Image: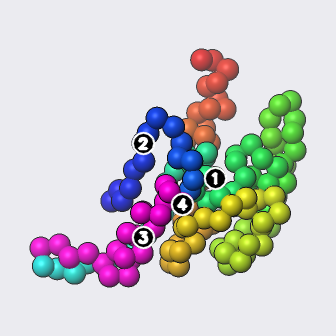
């Protein structure tokens, strides 16, 4: 079920303005469920799906072209031919560490209202699986 969609002429200026209404309503729905046709239904937040720039914006982290941009692990990027590359493997990022600000050097740039949703795993529940940024851009930008 889609809970919130944002559209506008430009990106929201402040993440709090953008997310506060959604986070407040989500907390209420997650805590109390919803009543449909007289039946109380419990709700679980499974994922927040967003493109790469929006993921970084709502989580308050480095954008996809930053040195510390990987949302899932602590790998450091290296600039190569005007592109950020990430070689090798690194230790995974963890929700508990994110919540206590352990990644504030490099990765976490600003606080995010999403942390008010206690059941949200900020690392695992915001997947990096949008095909536009994982597949299409790298394969098609030279042909368009």
Residue interval drawn in magenta: 16-37
Q: Are marks 3 and 1 in contact (CB under 8 Å)?
A: no
The reply to whether residue 12 is in sight is yes
Residue placed under numbered mark 3 in the picture: 24
Residue placed under numbered mark 4 in the picture: 16
Q: Pick whichever of labels 3 and 1 is earlier in the sequence.
A: 3
The correct choice, above or below, for 100 with respect to 76 in the image is: below
Q: Which mark is residue 81?
A: none
Q: Which mark is residue 7?
A: 2
Residue sitting at x 65%, y 65%: 111
Residue sitting at x 78%, y 72%: 102
Q: Which mark is residue 56?
A: 1
- What is the C-alpha distance between the residues marked 4 and 3? 11 Å
- From the viewer's side, name the closer residue of 27 and 70: 27
Screen quadrant of the N terminus? bottom left
**63 sits left or right of 21 in the view:** right
Q: Identify the image quadrant of residue 140.
A: top right
Instruction: Name the secondary structure under disc 1.
Output: helix
Q: Residues within 10 Å of mark 1 (few under 14, many from 20)?
A: many
Instruction: Name the secondary structure under disc 2.
Output: loop
Q: Residues within 10 Å of mark 3 (few under 14, many from 20)?
A: some
């Amino acid at each position: 079920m889609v809970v919130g969609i944002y559209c506008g002429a430009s990106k929201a200026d402040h993440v709090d303005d953008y997310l506060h209404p959604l986070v407040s309503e989500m907390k209420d729905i997650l805590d109390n469920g919803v009543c449909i046709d007289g039946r109380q239904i419990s709700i679980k937040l499974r994922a927040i799906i967003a493109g790469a720039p929006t993921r970084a914006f709502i989580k308050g982290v480095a954008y996809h072209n930053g040195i510390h941009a990987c949302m899932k692990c602590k790998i450091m990027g290296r600039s190569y031919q005007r592109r950020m590359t990430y070689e090798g493997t690194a230790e995974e990022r963890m929700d508990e560490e994110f919540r206590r600000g352990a990644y504030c050097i490099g990765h976490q740039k600003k606080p995010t209202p999403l942390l008010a949703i206690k059941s949200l795993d900020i690392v695992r529940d915001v997947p990096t699986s949008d095909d536009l940024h994982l597949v299409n851009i790298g394969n098609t930008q030279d042909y368009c």
